[in-house]
Amino acid sequence: RVLACTSGPQTILGAGDDQEAIDDPILRGRSVLVADDEPTIRNAIQRLLEERGAVVEAFADGSGAIEVIERDHDAIDLVISDVQMPDRNGYEVFRSTREHAPDAAIVLMTGFGYDPNHSIVRSSQEGLEACLFKPFRVDQLFEEIHKALRGRTAAGGDT
């Protein structure tokens, strides 16, 4: 645990614990895209979501996620993306999701480093529902996911 706490933004605190499948009616059956160039985080998020019944497609870059968003926009419920990736950044993933899959919820993640593109600020001004600062705990991940999905469901139900 000490190692995980001191590993910085490449970890999800508590994700290494052995966990059983959890019935999560908010996530069960949802289609989720995860984009993060850090394999430890990407794989942990995918595993945690799948344990709760989500169908997850994970990408090591923003380009792969954007390609799927543009192609399969009607089938996407949630996009979780890192802000800083080597090719297409989190803001670009956010914009593509808003344009092609406007009903999908979005969670952006970032380390405490400088965000040269101001992705979090720009996305927040354009309706981002949820944001995580790495390293984060498993319970924080699901709190933000639930908040984003509930927000989109409520917004979609009012139209």
Image (cartoon, rainbow, N blue to C red):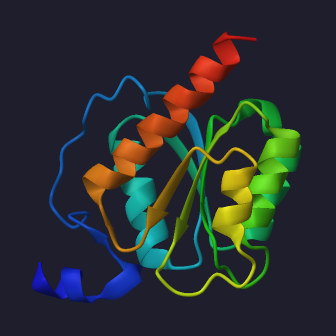
In the rendered image, the quadrant that contains the C terminus is: top right
Residue drawn 24% across the image and 39% down it: 21
Extreme residue in the top direction: 158
- Tell me: 1 left or right of 111: left
Q: Is residue 146 visible?
A: yes
Q: Nearer the viewer, residue 117 or 82?
A: 117
Image coords of residue 89 (percent x, y): 74, 73
Image coords of residue 62 (percent x, y): 73, 68
Residue drawn 15% across the image and 58% down it: 18
Q: Nearer the viewer, residue 16 or 92?
A: 92
Instruction: Give the answer, above or below, for where 42 lies relative to 22.
Output: below
Q: How many marks?
A: 0
Instruction: Give the answer, above or below, for where 110 lies relative to 10.
Output: above
Instruction: Give the answer, above or below, for where 80 lies relative to 110.
Output: above
Residue drawn 73% across the image and 30% down it: 103
Q: Is residue 64 visible?
A: no
Q: Quadrant of residue 81?
A: bottom right
Image coords of residue 46 (percent x, y): 45, 56
Image coords of residue 153 (percent x, y): 59, 22
Q: Quadrant of residue 30?
A: top right
- Tell me: 141 left or right of 129: left
In the rendered image, the quadrant that contains the N terminus is: bottom left
Instruction: Give the answer, above or below, for where 51 lies relative to 113.
Output: above
Q: Quadrant of residue 116?
A: bottom right
- Tell me: 98 left or right of 142: right
